[in-house]
Image (tube, rainbow, N blue to C red):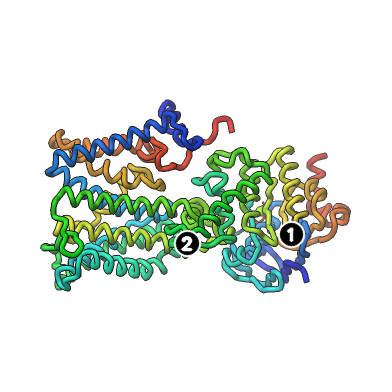
Amino acid sequence: MALLEVRRLTKRFAGLTANNSIDLDVPEGCLFAVIGPNGAGKTTFFNMISGFMPPTDGTIAFAGETITGLRQDRIAAKGLVRTFQLVQLFKGLTVAENVEVGFHLATRGGVAAALARPSWFRRQEADVHARARELLGFVGLAGVADQDAELLPYGQQRLLEVARALAAKPRLLLLDEPAAGLNAHETDALAEVVQELNRKGTTVLLIEHDMALVTRIAHRIAVLDFGCKIAEGTPDEIKRHPDVIAAYLGTEEAAHA
Amino acid sequence: MTSHASTSTSPVRRGAPGWLGRTGYVGLGGAVLIALLFGFVFVKGGYLLTVMQLAMIYGVFCVGLNFFMGYTGQASFGQNAFAAIGGYGSAILCVEYGLPPVLALLVAMAIAGVAAVVVGWPTLRLRGHYLAMATFALGLITYDVSVQWESLTKGYMGYAGIPPLGIGPFEVEDERAKLVCLMVILVFGLWVSGRLRNSRFGRALRAISTSEPGAAALGIRIPYYKLAAFVIAALYASVAGSLFAHVVGFISPEVFGLQMVVVTFTMLYVGGIGTVLGPAIGAIVASLLPEIVRSTGRFQDIAYALLLLGLLVYAPKGLSALSGLGRPRAAEPKPGS
Ligand SMILES: Nc1ncnc2c1ncn2[C@@H]1O[C@H](COP(=O)(O)OP(=O)(O)OP(=O)(O)O)[C@@H](O)[C@H]1O
Ligand SMILES: [Mg+2]
């Protein structure tokens, strides 16, 4: 049984079928990539899996449990955490505080605990504080922990969003174009972080435009085009797949030639 | 604008603890200024005491409103409704039912809290302008009820003869003692606010204020936290209403009317929305300004408006941002990025 099992997932927007009966299995431990041209329906696919958009049809099972139609925070609580194509940082908070918010699910205590500050709560806050800094170290942002998040350059904002998602201890991490807008150096840094966290046991489902990056790090790739899954396989299989070359690589390589 | 920009960004950079640069001195200066102000008011007495008493009461209201509007970033134009519940609750419970003031205050708070849950549950699903409109309607409805339900509220005439605050045989009747009492309550309210802000709970609220999708994706139950912030704001508002009733001894629908919404918004923005101390600073400053401009005679409204405008232009993040006291949000993008 795969960790994520998507069956016949379909999304229609007035007249437009953004996702057309997509089947996908993401095995535990896999670094899985979804690629496809602009408007292929990749983000829509993520939005449905993470509960940000109800599917028109189809089912989503996570760790053997149906999660179709659950609220976003319930899905996150089950260990399925996502990032966004447009960075969604908490702007009034420092870099470290952003990651501390990520520990929300892993911690407890509300108003009463915050007021009374019993010893378990103080320990927990200290722990969150320390572990947030550890995670920032992991993505290479330790030096800017106390800065305001919105003052970070764009590349670091993306890394921060990944660190924040990791704090939620995902079993499956959905990354929506985490390398979009990054320069070559930042992309390498990000790729390393993604590979490293995958090695540490987090299953990753990654949307990415950068073919070179995807074929380098992904174990398995699915290709969407006009809302349909047109191919799935290992990076080598995908690179050779005629439909993929026509729909995606072909146009890109033609553009680069 | 440019010269101002550089002075207002610097406090925003969070220095190491114990660092006392220019911003630290501004904070220290502010604290000294407030101490001097209270000293002066205590010595001088008279009308200024009343002004400061009301400033403390509005301060309590604003510290609560800040939970919802500042930390959580939602708009409410109707929090005065809960102040009315507090005020009328205390008045009626004390005068008609002979409850001691402290108990009446607590009962009124409980009623306001329940009302906030009942009203907030459906409305908080609305977003942006719709939520603002719904809360605005709530304020108007409460005003109408307090005018129309004469058997309960005495309508336009208002409710008089409300006993002063007190515990058992001790009644706080001296004006200076009242002010001290209110100061203690406001400081307690600030303590609660600061403690909640810098905790798991407060971080969740502040996350919601800038990115709801981001917060939801990390497992934060957005409707629950919005409701919690709304109810906390209502509890503070209710306390403010009760305090007004006991300190002034008289309430009427106008006390909790639209004027209150306008005044408290001004205070929140002047002091610094989203900061811990901002609402209290704003309440004091916005209460004193009319007294300061009074000398300008018939131009006082214009002078007041100009002063407010000046404050909002030159301290757009509020006065507390000038000191770095309230840990303000940062703003300007890093040069060259
Ligand atoms: N909320 C919506 N309402 C209507 N149409 C939508 C909505 N969201 C997406 N679409 C449409 O669905 C299609 C797929 O969009 P989607 O954002 O999923 O593509 P994508 O593969 O993520 O593209 P990109 O690579 O540009 O991010 C597009 O044609 C888009 O315009
Ligand atoms: Mg997309």
Q: Is residue A249 at all visible to an observer of this figure?
A: no
According to the picture, the residue beneath numbered tag 1 turns out to be A203
Q: Is residue B322 above or below residue A172?
A: above
Give the residue at x 22% y 58%.
Answer: B243
- Return the residue at label 2: A110
Disc 2 sits on a residue from what chain?
Answer: A
Q: Position of residue B104 (x, y in %)?
A: 23, 67
Quarter of the image that includes the C terminus of chain B: top right
As helix, strand or loop, the secondary structure at mark 2 comes to loop
- Residue farthest along the top direction in this orientation: B3
- Image side of residue A174 versus residue A250, left or right: left
- Amino acid type, callout 1: Thr
Above-or-below relation of A257 to B259: above
Q: Position of residue A171 (x, y in %)?
A: 69, 62
Q: At x 55% / y 39%, what residue is drawn?
A: A151
Query: Which residue type carries mark 2?
Result: Gly
